Image: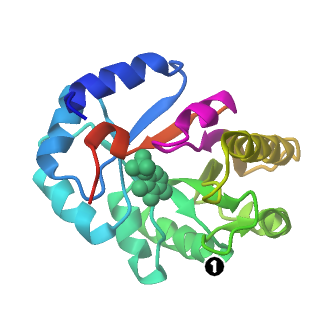
Amino acid sequence: MSSSISERIVSIRSSLPTSVKLIAVSKQVPAQAIRSAYAAGIRDFAESRIQEAASKQAELQDLPDITWHFIGHLQSNKAKKAIEQFPWIHSVDNLKLAQRLDQLAQQLGVSPQVCLQVKILPDPNKSGWSVPELLADLPTLNQYKNLQIQGLMTIPPSGLNDPEILNAFNLNRELAKKIQEQNWSHIKMQHLSMGMSGDYELAVQAGATMVRLGTILFGDRS
Ligand SMILES: *Cc1c(COP(=O)(O)O)cnc(C)c1O
């Protein structure tokens, strides 16, 4: 990639519907590159490790209007830090974690926005609720009043072709719609967090409201 971060941001932004939030995934990316993306207008950044994020967040404190999103697998012992550092958590992937986050949010007097991570197709390599598990857990999740449950996050299994990926994203949208129609008092389904560098166009086609883009903005992480 010979273009600059800001050129890539401008070009991708202009290809996205204005209703879709572009979240820049800055894991393994130095603070300086985050500043470049910020200068190009990005205000939403995502990280997948608490420790790595903490040092960059400290370094970037002069940019107070950044919204930080957590997208990694969250261990229980890091839950408190996650809530303190991240107003958004996209990767709430099981009931026990949701319960822990709810308790901590109450203690800390905050109400984080969260997405429930769903394995919309069976996938032994990922964490997240299967569809039947999620439907069964909704009554309990509805009681976690310190969490603002905003929608579903999904990552399709690897190895699918484009029509299969599109189908997975469509299934996720339909699941969100089904849950919304159940009219839970504390579960909203306004957001679909789906789409990464390789598949975000398909995700947008299927109704994503937030895309999480790393490599395509910042280059290879390796
Ligand atoms: C790393 C990561 C991304 C970004 O992936 P790219 O392919 O670099 O765009 C998005 N979502 C999650 C959950 C990730 O871990």
Q: Is residue 141 above or below residue 13?
A: below
Residue with the mark numbered 1: 96
Which region of the structure is painted magenta?
Answer: 191-206
At 64% from the left edge and 58% from the top edge, which residue is drawn?
A: 116
Q: Quadrant of residue 33?
A: top left
Q: Say what amino acid the circle numbered 1 marks.
A: Lys
Q: Is residue 52 above or below residue 112?
A: below
Q: Does the segment drawn in magenta span residue 136?
A: no
Please identify the quadrant where the N terminus is shown: top left
Please identify the quadrant where the C terminus is shown: bottom left
Residue 111 shows up from this direction: no
Q: Is residue 48 left or right of residue 186?
A: left
Residue 187 shows up from this direction: yes
Return the residue found at the far bottom: 77
Q: Nearer the viewer, residue 70 or 170?
A: 170
Q: Is residue 146 above or below residue 150?
A: below
- Does dot 1 land on a helix, a strand or a loop? helix
At 64% from the left edge and 60% from the top edge, which residue is drawn?
A: 157
Q: Quadrant of residue 10?
A: top left
Color scheme of the displayed model: rainbow
Q: Is residue 131 left or right of residue 104?
A: right
- Residue 91, image x and y in percent? 54, 61
Q: Does the segment drawn in magenta span residue 203?
A: yes
